[in-house]
């Protein structure tokens, strides 16, 4: 597992442009968010933390789907599957490497948001970063699934709006889930991002942190594990 | 000792038969060449032996175990036709990763680099290497774990003649050390470098035997002619 994590991080390190995009783009968006709502700072205070926490979900989904697709098409996955390497070790290595990348990303964005942009959260700031890492794992796991259904990198990127946008629209960021039509509410109930948004919103508004917060975090992590399990099922030792 | 024993292997891909009733044995400690035109099913046969190919039917035993079973993964090495290494890592980083998986030490990395003449390019990123150099990185990776069976899919394509000769010397040295090598090629002039030959055509075994035995049987001079006569006989 450590071997794979080191290898994935070494690949990432060789690609400074991607690192810059991972860290720079969410910082830019956070800044733009602050500026477009310059007259209504309550809006920024309301969505600033959730955006910070949700961004690693999107980044890691894109990166994982493309990297894993490359493994499938370049033959390296075939080689790995012929070696004494357990699937869990491979996936664990990926998860560890991208979780670390998410820590860097979320830390950089939170330094900007909590510092220069003056974002306030009622709860502890590290909780936002921790939730961002959980979301990164969820994104990584879904990216792994996506890579199994895409034949080209172009297709993999096209999956992004299909997997991400509906979840973003329905998670409660734009319209509170309680105000949605019943059928939309029902769909949002089964999407993992709804729960991680709820958890982030609770940290943002200083609670309550009762059982519901724990439940939200648990559902997010369970969603990541489920997606990881589905992703593992797409890694086949034997292919046709 | 037989390293590979195949009985009535059948593989279908996309509803189309790729291998039909293939039966053969690969003798241990020798270099066996798998020859045939492209599209004859060489890669599918090699993938079946390594255990990464879904097979339709038939028996396949490798080193005394059913092909593709977990204990074989450390004992069988596979070099795919396209160099399956990470293009965005250096040669050494690639080898280090696969060495960690195989539990091979640092000295093994230096040994395989020397074996394929890549010491001077160890620090170079793979994407900046030529096709032949990439193929050698892929071969070095396959050598890392000191495998008992080496399955190499067209390992010498695109290499210059000197390097090609060196690699065949390496293959024979490994075989003398007790390893079994199964090497595919679509170039008939490589057949003479093999101890044994398996000729494949349209997903079926055309003939097996040593190069000289096949010449004798067909009365042909070059192995190209051997192949032609065998095809005409069918």
Image (cartoon, rainbow, N blue to C red):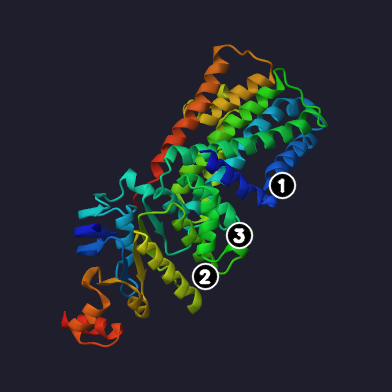
- The picture places residue A219, in percent across and down from the top left corner, at 50, 24
Label 2 environment density (alpha carbons within 10 Å; few <14, some 14–19, many ≥20) = some
3 and 2 marks in contact (CB < 8 Å): no
Residue sitting nearer the eye, B55 or B106: B106
**What SS does tag 1 mark?**
helix
The residue carrying mark 3 is B122
Discs 2/1, front: 2
Q: Single out the residue that lies furthest toward the front.
A: B177
Residue sitting nearer the eye, B56 or B60: B60
**What SS does tag 3 mark?**
loop
Rendered position, B84 above or below B222: above
Question: What residue sits 50% from the left and 74% below the top?
Answer: B163
Q: Is residue A58 left or right of residue A237?
A: right
The lab-note entry on whether marks 3 and 1 share a chain reads no
Label 1 environment density (alpha carbons within 10 Å; few <14, some 14–19, many ≥20) = few
Q: Is residue B160 visible?
A: no
- Report, in whole angstroms, how far the alpha carbon at label 2 lies from the one at label 1: 33 Å
- Report, in whole angstroms, how far the alpha carbon at label 3 lies from the one at label 2: 15 Å
The lab-note entry on whether marks 2 and 1 share a chain reads no
């Amino acid at each position: 597992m450590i071997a794979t994590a080191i290898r994935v991080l070494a690949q990432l390190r060789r690609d400074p442009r991607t690192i810059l995009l991972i860290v720079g783009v969410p910082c830019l968006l956070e800044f733009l968010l602050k500026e477009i709502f310059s007259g209504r700072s309550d809006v920024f205070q309301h969505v600033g933390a959730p955006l910070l926490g949700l961004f690693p979900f999107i980044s890691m989904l894109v990166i994982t789907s493309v990297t894993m697709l490359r493994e499938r098409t370049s033959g390296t996955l075939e080689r790995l599957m012929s070696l004494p390497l357990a699937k869990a070790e491979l996936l664990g290595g990926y998860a560890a490497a991208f979780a670390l990348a998410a820590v860097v990303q979320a830390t950089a964005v939170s330094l900007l948001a909590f510092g220069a942009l003056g974002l306030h959260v009622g709860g502890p700031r590290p909780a936002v970063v921790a939730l961002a890492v959980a979301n990164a794992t969820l994104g990584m796991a879904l990216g792994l699934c996506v890579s199994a259904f895409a034949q080209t990198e172009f297709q993999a990127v096209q999956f992004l709006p299909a997997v991400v946008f509906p979840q973003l629209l329905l998670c409660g960021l734009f319209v509170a889930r309680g105000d949605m039509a019943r059928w939309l509410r029902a769909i949002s109930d089964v999407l993992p991002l709804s729960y991680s948004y709820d958890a982030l919103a609770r940290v943002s508004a200083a609670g309550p942190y009762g059982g519901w917060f724990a439940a939200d975090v648990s559902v997010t992590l369970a969603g990541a594990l489920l997606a990881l399990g589905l992703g593992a099922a797409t890694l086949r030792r034997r292919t046709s | 000792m037989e390293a590979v024993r195949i009985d009535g292997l059948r593989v279908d891909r996309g509803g189309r038969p790729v291998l039909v009733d293939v039966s053969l044995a690969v003798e241990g400690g020798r270099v066996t060449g798998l020859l045939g035109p492209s599209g004859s099913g060489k890669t599918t046969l090699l993938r079946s032996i390594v255990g990464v190919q879904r097979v339709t039917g038939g028996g396949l035993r490798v080193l005394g175990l059913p092909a593709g079973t977990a204990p074989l993964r450390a004992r069988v090495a596979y070099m795919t036709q396209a160099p399956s290494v990470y293009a965005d890592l250096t040669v050494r980083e690639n080898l280090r990763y696969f060495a960690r998986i195989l539990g091979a030490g640092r000295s093994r990395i230096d040994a395989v680099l020397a074996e394929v003449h890549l010491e001077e390019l160890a620090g170079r990123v793979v994407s900046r290497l030529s096709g032949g150099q990439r193929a050698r990185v892929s071969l070095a990776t396959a050598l890392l774990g000191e495998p008992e069976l080496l399955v190499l899919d067209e390992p010498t394509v695109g290499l210059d003649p000197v390097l090609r000769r060196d690699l065949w010397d390496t293959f024979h040295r490994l075989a003398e050390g007790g390893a079994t090598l199964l090497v595919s090629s679509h170039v008939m002039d490589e057949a003479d470098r093999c101890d044994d030959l398996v000729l494949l055509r349209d997903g079926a075994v055309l003939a097996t035997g040593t190069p000289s035995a096949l010449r004798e049987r067909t009365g042909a001079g070059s192995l190209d002619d051997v192949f032609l006569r065998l095809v005409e006989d069918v």
